[in-house]
Image (cartoon, rainbow, N blue to C red):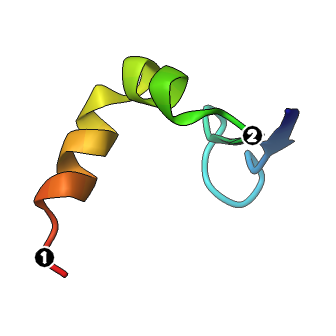
Amino acid sequence: MGVSLQGYSTECAEEAIEISVLGIGYPLYEQLFPHAVAAYLKAPG
């Protein structure tokens, strides 16, 4: 698993950050981000 925190405060705003987390398995991902999984399952195609 990898984690990356990148600050974009100079480009966006003082409170803006981007967080990328790689390697989260599906059962845990669904627990952490149920709204994202639900939206993905509802998306056409």
Residue 42 on image: x %, y %: 11, 58
Q: Which residue is drawn at 75% across and 50% down?
A: 8
Residue 25 horizontal/vertical position (percent): 61, 33
Secondary structure beneath dot 2 equals: loop
Identify which residue is drawn at 86% across, 39% down: 4
Residue type indicated by callout 2: Gly
* Left or right position of 34 against 31: left
| Quadrant of the image occupied by residue 36 | top left
Residue 44's disc is 1
Q: Do the residues labelled 2 and 1 touch (CB within 8 Å)?
A: no
- The residue at the point 80 percent across, 42 percent down is 7
7 horizontally vs 14: left or right = right
Residue 27 position, x and y percent, is 47, 25
For the residue marked with disc 1, what is the amino acid? Pro
Callout 2: 10 Å neighbours few (<14), some, many (20+)?
A: few
Rendered-image quadrant of the N terminus: top right
Q: Which of 45 and 19 is in front in this view?
A: 45
The reply, left or right, for residue 32 in relation to residue 20 is left
Element at badge 1?
A: loop
Q: Which numbered disc covers residue 23? A: 2
Extreme residue in the bottom direction? 45
